[in-house]
Image (cartoon, helix red, strand yellow):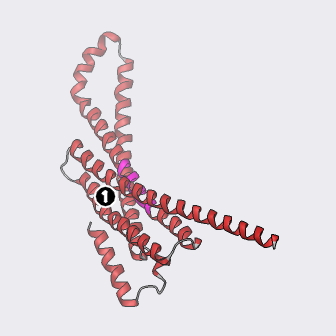
Amino acid sequence: MKNVKVLKTILLAGLLTFGAPQMPRTEAAVPAYILEIIRQGVKKAIVAIDLKIQRMQNNTIWLQNAQKVLENALNKLKLSEIAEWGERQKELYGDYYEGLWKVKSVLSQYQKVRDIARMQGRLVSEYQQAWQIIVGSGNFSAKELRWMEKVYLGIMDRSIENLEQLTEAIQAFNLKMNDGERLALIDRVEKRVRFNLTDLMRFNERNLLINRQRSYAKGEIKTLNDIHHEKD
């Protein structure tokens, strides 16, 4: 994905020139430039798809109007004339019906790609919410946080790779691909992105569960200590 690679190069250059933000790794976990790459990649993908969807919707409106003209003409004919007239017009209006079907088919594919992009964007927000809780709780050791960092970084790196696949899916609409080939490509990208998001959410769930358990244990210990002091 050229745009993603260019953006990553620019952001890395900025970090090398001005220096990375001075903050403990356990507070940052995933570097800001990686999150920004994902955000910008998702934003560009959604904008590109929305523009394509708008054009396709305009085509759909035009074709639907043509369809209504045909149907209105048929309704004005007598039943005995419909078969003969319909046969004569079949070739003329056949392209309209076929075009309408193709536009609607491609439109649904565009919408699916947009959903994939939004799923990709959700990855960042799900990570940030969980990491803020994890670090702020004080329930994890530095060693545990470093291990979590590595896992989260791996998930985000795969997310960047998925952005490249997402761009390929968008570009596929401009290539000479049939519906089957394009759908197969979109399905592959969706599976990768969905797996990546599921992976992140399971990891978040595991970490947040441990956090709740340790918070509960701390509360129990405090209660016992309070009871002990009262007896004293």
Depth order, front residue of 190/109: 190
Q: Main secondary structure of the magenta part?
A: helix
Residue 42 percent across, percent down from the top left: 39, 62
| Residue drawn at x 45%, y 57% as measured from the top left | 201
**Residue 58 colored magenta?**
no
Query: What residue occupies the far left of the structure in this picture?
Result: 176
Residue at which label 1 appears: 166
Depth order, front residue of 34/70: 34
Q: Residues within 10 Å of mark 1 (few under 14, many from 20)?
A: many
| Residue drawn at x 33%, y 68% as measured from the top left | 157
Q: Quadrant of the N terminus?
A: bottom left
Dot 1: element: helix
| Residue drawn at x 19%, y 48% as measured from the top left | 177
Q: Which segment did they paint magenta? A: 111-123
In the displayed structure, does residue 205 sit left or right of residue 90? Answer: right
| Residue drawn at x 22%, y 42% as measured from the top left | 180
Q: Quadrant of the C terminus?
A: bottom right
**Residue 121 colored magenta?**
yes
Say whether residue 36 is visible: no
Say whether residue 153 is visible: yes
User: Is 194 located above or below residue 11 in the figure?
Assistant: above
The quadrant where residue 222 appears: bottom right
Amino acid type at mark 1: Leu
Depth order, front residue of 85/95: 95
Query: What residue occupies the far top of the structure in this picture?
Result: 80
Residue 28 percent across, percent down from the top left: 47, 77
